[in-house]
Amino acid sequence: MRAVHLAERPAALVSMWRRMVLFVGGMFIILGATEGYLALVEPDTIETSSFNARHATPYVEFYSKPNFTGRSIITNDAGFRYGPLPVEKPVGELRVFFLASSVGFRGKANETTIAGYMESLLAAQRNGSKRHVRVINASGTSFTSTQSLVLLVTKILKYQPDVLVVFHGPESLLYPSVYENRPGYPFNFRVRERIQNRTATADDGVNSIVAILNQFRLTRHFHPNLARNVRQAAIAQHNYVTTFHSLEEYDPYIDTIVDDVARMVRIAAAYDCRTMIAIPPWQSAALLPGAVERLAERVQDQANRYAGATRYIDTRQMTNELSTRRLWQADGVHWNDDGNRLIATYLAESLEETGWLERAP
């Protein structure tokens, strides 16, 4: 009996190895097929995970690259997330410039950003009108209100805007806790100011295993921010941040936002341009309760000082509607394209109610 058992052992081992090879081979075939499928149905997500759409820009520090195409993001020669835009404004055309941080820049396509939806909604509402309304998305990823102010002066005014939509606020209260605690400074400014450039490059802080895994769409499908999270953790140790314990500690940052808004309103008015101001909805627990409300009250008070030249739009009720419809993303800061459409509808209707679009260009 023992002799028979020993004789059968090699055959059993061969059978076991054959099954293992078939199993491993089958797994590779399944993973390969899944990778191929994702390559067909999902866009490449590497482009914006390392902020490849941005580049160093005078005065504003960084902005979208001109004529960039990637992951359905298309910018024109000015870096706006918009199609071709001549500097000279044709007769009968109204130009609305949308200024915001990533909440305004985000969208699966240019047409599904808040500005993109606003343009299509205004076109539908004004069907038959001789005036063509453009809504140009001049938002910048990670932008502060100060950067939008500088962008207005250095880039936007030459395009003869008729209306500004300023959609800023909570992000500038968040940055001090995670990036840079000096009021008005752009995100990660200290990294670029104090640390060697290699610290903030796309590959620094990402170990080789993460780098390899991040090359596969299958990894990016289930963990889209894998490399970015690891990289940010490495960079975060160099940031200059603060912890808030009371609402009064937000005041220096609120002062900066209020001052930026006031400057934008005055500069725009000098060029016969009106300003609509709205505070983006906010759900994230990253800010102390009441911080956004404190900001909104101050901004509204400032807007009221410039009656006729500006209009404050209260969007706080949008927070609950975004929650009810489950449109928030996990960070509680951003929302999906349906959220963009919801907010765009409210802003477009509010803009129509001002009567500003009836003015002759």
Image (spheres, rainbow, N blue to C red):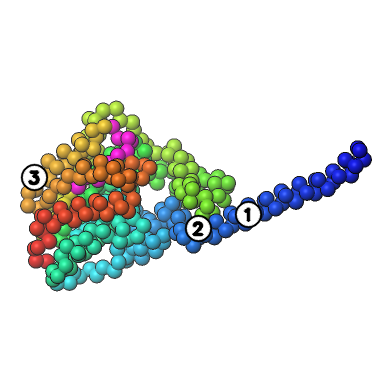
Viewed as shown, does residue 79 lie left or right of 127?
right
Q: Residues within 10 Å of mark 1 (few under 14, many from 20)?
A: few
Q: Amino acid at mark 3?
A: Arg
- The answer to which of 272 and 105 lies nearer the viewer is 105
Q: Amino acid at mark 2?
A: Leu
User: Is residue 235 a member of the stretch shown in magenta?
Assistant: no
Task: Kindly state the secondary structure of the residue where label 3 is placed.
Answer: loop
190 w.r.t. 268: above or below: above
> Which residue is label 2 attached to?
38
Q: Residues within 10 Å of mark 3 (few under 14, many from 20)?
A: few
> Which mark is on residue 305?
3
Decide if residue 78 is in sight here: no
> Which mark is on residue 28?
1
**Quarter containing the N terminus:** top right
- The answer to which of 260 and 295 lies nearer the viewer is 295
Viewed as shown, does residue 138 lie left or right of 45?
left
How many numbered marks appear? Answer: 3
What's drawn in magenta, residue-wise? 278-288
